[in-house]
Amino acid sequence: MFTTSVDKKTLGETNGLLISGASLKDTAELTGLSYAKVSYLRKKLVKAGALQPLYKTTRKTRTTRKVRTQTTNPIVNNRVGNQPSSNFDGIKLVINGTELNIRNAKSVDVSTGLVDIKY
């Protein structure tokens, strides 16, 4: 990045033109500055909150889904009245027709292309 070496009068005139809505090209011609410097000054005004950005920017967020396992303590299960339906105590996960049996895991994170199992 470069720093601006513009006198205060030209800087004030440039900021005034940009805030009033003049285009970058017109502002560069009227003030005698280069297009790149005027663009840099506009960027500084956007960061300061005086102007809105020219283009809408989007951010992609990564979403993950967390699946928690339940402990299969036989004392707790008998107290509640839940009887296990099979000998398998854990999570059965089917991915593209492939079955994964997960036992004694603290957490299982499933996202696109990733299965993270923590014990």
Image (cartoon, helix red, strand yellow):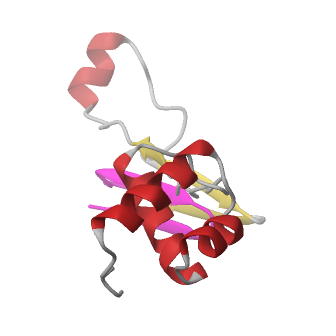
Residue occupying image coordinates x 46% and y 57%: 13
Q: In this orientation, which residue lies closer to the viewer: 98 or 24? A: 24
Residue occupying image coordinates x 30% and y 72%: 7
Q: In this orientation, which residue lies closer to the viewer: 23 or 85? A: 23
The answer to whether 109 appears left or right of 3 in the picture is right
Question: Please, which residue is most extreme toward the left here?
Answer: 75
Question: Please, which residue is most extreme toward the top here?
Answer: 80
Percent of width and height locating residue 103:
39, 56
Up-down: is 99 above or below 58? below
The answer to whether 14 appears left or right of 103 in the picture is right
Judge whether residue 63 can be spotted in this image.
Answer: no
Report the quarter where the N terminus lies. bottom left
Residue occupying image coordinates x 43% and y 43%: 50
Report the quarter where the C terminus lies. bottom left
The answer to whether 4 appears left or right of 54 in the picture is left
Residue occupying image coordinates x 46% and y 31%: 84
Percent of width and height locating residue 60:
58, 58
Up-down: is 42 above or below 113? above
Q: In this orientation, which residue lies closer to the viewer: 58 or 33? A: 33
The segment highlighted magenta reads: 102-119
Percent of width and height locating residue 111:
56, 59
Question: Please, which residue is most extreme toward the right here?
Answer: 97
Q: How many marks?
A: 0
Percent of width and height locating residue 20:
59, 43
Is residue 114 magenta-colored? yes
What type of secondary structure mainly makes up the magenta span?
strand
Judge whether residue 72 can be spotted in this image.
Answer: yes
The answer to whether 15 appears left or right of 31 in the picture is left
Q: Quadrant of residue 109?
A: bottom left
Is residue 22 magenta-colored? no
